[in-house]
Each structure stands twice: as C-alpha cells, then as structure tokens.
Image (cartoon, rainbow, N blue to C red):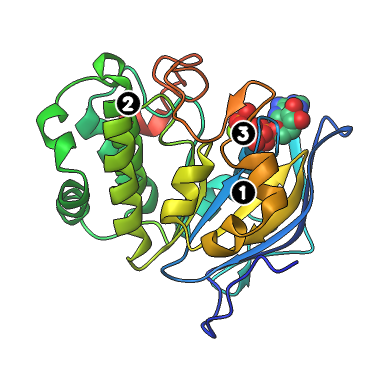
C-alpha cells in the first residue's frame, strides 16, 4: 500500500515501519510508513484511538518519562536520521509539533508564547518570524498582550499554530487544530492550512473530520486500531466504497468523522491542565 507521493523530489520526512508502544505492552501504532516532500499536506484520519496522535508524537519524539516508546526502521528528516535525537534536537532541526492537548500556556501572553517558540529555533530574527506569522494569522495581532488563559478556544488554536510557525518549521505536525471550532472558523483554518501547504515546508496533520482532510490534503492515511487501513489521494479514497462506508459520513462508535466536534473536548480550549511554563519562558519577561 503506497503512502507516498511519487514527485521525484527528495523527502523532507521519511518514516519507515514505525511502531509505538505504551508501557511496553499497549500498542499505539503498528508499522506505519509515510513520506513527506516539500509542499506536501498529508492528513491522518480515523476513529478515536486509531493512532493519529501516537504517530505524530512518535515522529516529534516522546519526551523523557513519557510512557510511549517508538521503534522505527528509518526516521529521517532532510535525509538525516533523527532516530537517536531527543525532542529538543528535533525541534532545532525544524520538526515542530502543535500538540493535541495543552496547546498554549495560560500564564504567558501571546507575544511571550511566540517569542518562546522563536527562542527554541532562533531561526532569523524575532521580528521576521512575527511578520510572517501575522501575515498568515492576522487575527492574532489584536491579542498579542493577552494571556493564553483568557483566549477563546479558536484564538488558542490560532496562537498554537502561530507559535509553531514562529519556530520556522521544515516539517509541521499538527494534531487536531480544528477540534472544538465553530464551522466558520474551521473553514478559516482550512484556508490557513492550504496556504501553509503551499509553502517551503511539509505538513502532517491529524484530523477528526475526514471531510475536511479530503478537502485540503494531497494524500490521506486512514488509521484504525493503530494500522493504516487505507491511503491515497482524496479522489482515490472518495472512490473506495469500503472506505466511504466505514469512515465517510458515518457515525461510528459515537464519533462523527464528518462534522466538527463542538463539545470543546480533547484538544479544545480548557482541555487538560495547563502545561508547566518551561524555564526558558521565565527569561522572556
Ligand atoms: N499514554 C498512553 N498510555 C497507554 N496507551 C495509550 C496512551 N496514549 C495512547 N494510547 C493508546 O494508543 C492507541 C492510539 O491512541 P491515539 O491517541 O494515538 O489515537 P488517536 O487516533 O489520536 O485518537 P483520538 O482521535 O481520540 O485523538 C489507543 O489504543 C490509546 O488507548
Ligand atoms: Mg489524538
């Protein structure tokens, strides 16, 4: 089953046979392979527990003390193996994740969050990065001095994406950035992702809405119970009746893959506890 595009250019990210386990026993994902080239927008979709987050987190690198551990035949960024690199080293090389939960720091202002993100990569000047981010996400501008804890759910998703862009990603991993958003904001986010997909980076997104993924992605991987059960271009997947029956527009196990979750659960605003502000952030004020 091909999960790659054959465009001739060298892959920015190459993942071969990635397996994730939790606590040594529970399986997160089993043997997933994919490649991303510059300009690619690839979407991971599938039901709850399918393995989308596990895939993204394994590629970003599980932080120390995380119960997840990954094994991979090959994990290369820009042609170089990153298997042995920790999360910070991966970030420095441009592998940036917008996590599923705890997307913003409640105690930091938006400006501080963006500055912190820039700090991790120190790519270009802060002003350069801020200019770029505000071109893509002008809605952040009015909130630069507000603390993350006072932002709405939609504003938090925007700030999380803006922070990731401030790190100047080569490969951007985005976990559920539309979860909990009103339909108009989902459309706006879709436009933003499409625009980013055309830039000098590659995007791998986890998305609950299969409809949205088919609208914006170049290729889609359907993950179910930790395995890729289908992959291809949106047109290829739309023409597969088995996939349409199982995953397109069907409610399964209480999950609606076609509509936005308005519940605000999961990655949405207020989900989980606020992450600890890292030491580097304390230097920014
Ligand atoms: N910290 C953990 N400890 C044990 N098992 C875990 C952990 N995180 C995830 N899993 C398991 O790994 C599998 C894949 O979960 P994952 O979060 O990657 O799915 P997902 O596709 O992102 O789901 P969702 O749509 O709900 O976000 C599930 O069976 C889940 O229970
Ligand atoms: Mg998830």
Return the residue nearer the eye: 119 or 235.
235
Residue of label 2: 182
Return the residue nearer the eye: 50 or 157.
50
Residue lying at 46% horizontally and 21% vertically, measured from the top left: 275
Callout in the foreground (3, 2): 3
157 left or right, relative to 98:
left
Residue of label 3: 250
**Residue 82's x, y, as percent?**
63, 61
Q: Earlier in the sequence, mark 3 or mark 2?
A: 2
Q: Earlier in the sequence, mark 2 or mark 1?
A: 1
Task: For mark 3, give the secondary structure.
Answer: loop
For ligand 1, the image quadrant comes to top right
Callout in the foreground (2, 1): 2
**Residue 67's x, y, as percent?**
74, 30
View extreme (left): residue: 142
User: Picture quarter containing residue 220?
Assistant: bottom right
Residue of label 1: 86
Mark 1 in CB contact with mark 3 (< 8 angstroms)? no
């Amino acid at each position: 089953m091909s999960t790659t595009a054959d465009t001739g250019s060298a892959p920015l990210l190459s993942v071969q046979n990635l397996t994730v386990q939790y606590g040594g026993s529970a399986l997160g994902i089993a043997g997933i392979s994919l490649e991303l080239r510059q300009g690619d927008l690839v979407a991971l979709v599938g039901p709850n527990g399918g393995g989308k987050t596990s895939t993204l987190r394994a590629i970003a690198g599980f932080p120390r003390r995380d119960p997840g551990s990954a094994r991979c035949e090959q994990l290369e960024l820009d042609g170089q193996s990153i298997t042995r690199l920790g999360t910070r080293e991966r970030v420095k090389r441009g592998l940036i994740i917008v996590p599923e939960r705890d997307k913003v720091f409640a105690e930091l202002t938006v400006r501080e969050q963006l500055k912190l993100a820039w700090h991790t990569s120190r790519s270009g000047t802060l002003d350069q990065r801020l200019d770029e981010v505000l071109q893509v996400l002008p809605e952040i501008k009015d909130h630069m001095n507000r603390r993350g804890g006072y932002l709405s759910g939609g504003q938090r998703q925007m700030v999380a994406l803006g922070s990731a862009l401030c790190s100047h990603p080569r490969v951007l991993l985005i976990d559920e950035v539309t979860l909990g958003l009103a339909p108009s904001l989902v459309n706006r986010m879709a436009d933003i992702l499409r625009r980013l997909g055309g830039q000098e980076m590659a995007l791998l997104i986890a998305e609950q809405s299969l409809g949205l993924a088919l609208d914006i992605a170049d290729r889609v991987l359907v993950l179910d119970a930790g395995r890729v059960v289908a992959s291809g271009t949106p047109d290829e997947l739309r023409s597969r009746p088995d996939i349409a029956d199982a995953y397109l527009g069907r409610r399964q196990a209480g999950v609606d893959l076609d509509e936005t979750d308005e519940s605000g659960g999961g990655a949405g605003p207020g989900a989980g506890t606020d992450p600890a502000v890292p030491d580097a952030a304390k230097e920014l004020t």
